[in-house]
Amino acid sequence: MKNSELVGKTKDELNTKLVDLKKEQFNLRFQKATGQLENTARVKQVRRDVARVRTALHKQAGAKKA
């Protein structure tokens, strides 16, 4: 996911994306704990995507206050 993909989205869309990513992150942690995780790089990618979405949400919140 790139930042340019997040720029035009609404707050509700970003919140939905964040919930989906958090669920995926949980599932990946669960797979890792049980030894079923095949794509270990996905953990890092999802963690960074969560940070990108949160950053986009904070930027939107800051823009509305100003």
Image (tube, helix red, strand yellow):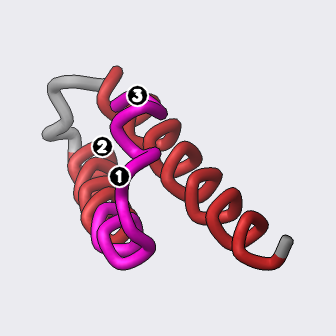
User: Which mark identifies residue 29?
Assistant: 1
Q: Pick the quarter of the image with the C terminus.
A: bottom right
Q: Residue at x 44, y 73 (%)?
A: 11
Camera-nearest residue between 47 and 58: 58
Mark 3 is surrounded, within 10 Å at the Cα level, by few (under 14), some (14 to 19) or many (20 or more) other residues, namely: few
Q: Which three-letter amino acid code belongs to the residue tagged 1?
A: Arg
Residue 44 lies left or right of residue 64; in this view the side is left
Asked if the residue under mark 2 is in contact with the one under mark 1, i.e. CB atoms within 8 Å, the reply is yes
How far apart marks 3 and 2 lie (CA) works out to 26 Å
Give the x, y percent position of residue 10.
38, 68
Question: Which residue does the numbered mark 2 point to in the structure image?
Answer: 32
Q: Residue at x 58, y 64 (%)?
A: 57
Q: Residue at x 40, y 30 (%)?
A: 45
Q: Is residue 4 magenta?
A: yes
Q: Pick the quarter of the image with the N terminus.
A: top left
* Region rendered in magenta: 1-17
